[in-house]
Amino acid sequence: MREPRLGLAWSGRRRAMRRRYSLYMSSPEWFTRREHWVKEWSDAHDGGTPHCLICGIEWTLSGDDLHHRTYARLGHERTADLIALCRPCHRELHRRMEANPEWRRRPREQATDVLVAQMRYQRNWKQIS
C-alpha cells in the first residue's frame, strides 16, 4: 500500500479504504473482473481490442492497467468505472493527480476525465509540432 505524501497523515477511514483497495487489487476477484471488463468492452466495440485512452497503444490484459475512475463500487465496478491505460500513462496520470491538490479536491471521475483529456491533447500536440 502506498504511503501518504510526505508531511500528510491519512485518517483511519482513509487507511482502511487503502487497505481494502490493496487487498482487492491482489485478489482473484480483481483478476476475474479484469477479464470480464475486456469481454464487456470488446462486446460493446464490435469485438475490437482496447487501447490506452491516452497514448492509443493496444492495451493488453497481462501488461497494462485498468484505472478506477471511481472507488464508489469497488469490488462491484461497472464497465464505465474502469478505463484502459498502458502502465506508463497510468503512472503519469497518478503522478499528476498527486502533484496538484486541486485534482484531489475534485470528484475522482471528473479529475480522471479532465486529466486524460489533457494528457491526450498534450501528446497529440507534441506529435504535430
Image (cartoon, helix red, strand yellow):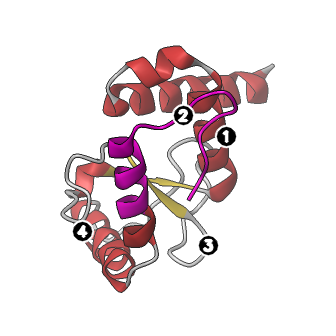
Q: In the structure shown, which secondary structural element does the residue marked by tag 3 occupy?
A: loop
> What residue is drawn where x is 24% and y is 57%?
79
Q: Say whether marks 4 and 3 touch (CB < 8 Å).
A: no
* Mark toward the viewer: 3 or 1: 1
Q: Which residue is mark 1?
A: 92
Query: Of marks 2 and 4, which one's residue comes earlier in the chain?
Result: 2
Residue for badge 2: 9
Does the magenta portion include 44? no
Dot 2 falls on a residue whose secondary structure is: loop
Can you identify the residue that label 3 sits on? 63
**Closer to the eye: label 2 or 4:** 2
Q: Is residue 8 visible?
A: yes
Q: Quadrant of residue 14?
A: top left
Q: Nearer the viewer, residue 22 or 49?
A: 22
Inspect the image, locate mark 2, and give the three-letter code of the amino acid beneath it.
Answer: Ala
Q: Mark 1 or mark 4: which comes first in sequence? A: 4
Quarter residue 62 falls in: bottom right
How far apart marks 3 and 1 lie (CA) works out to 16 Å
Residue at 33% in and 33% down: 109
- State the CA–CA distance, disc 2 to disc 3: 32 Å
Judge whether residue 2 is colored magenta. yes
Q: In the shown orientation, is residue 58 left or right of residue 13?
A: right
In percent of the image, x 25 and y 49: which residue is there?
80
| Mark 2 and mark 4 residues within 8 Å of each other at the beta carbon | no
Q: CA distance from mark 4 to mark 3?
A: 19 Å
Residue 40 numbered mark, or none: 4
Mark 2 and mark 1 lie on one chain; the one further toward the N terminus is 2
Q: Which residues are magenta?
A: 1-21
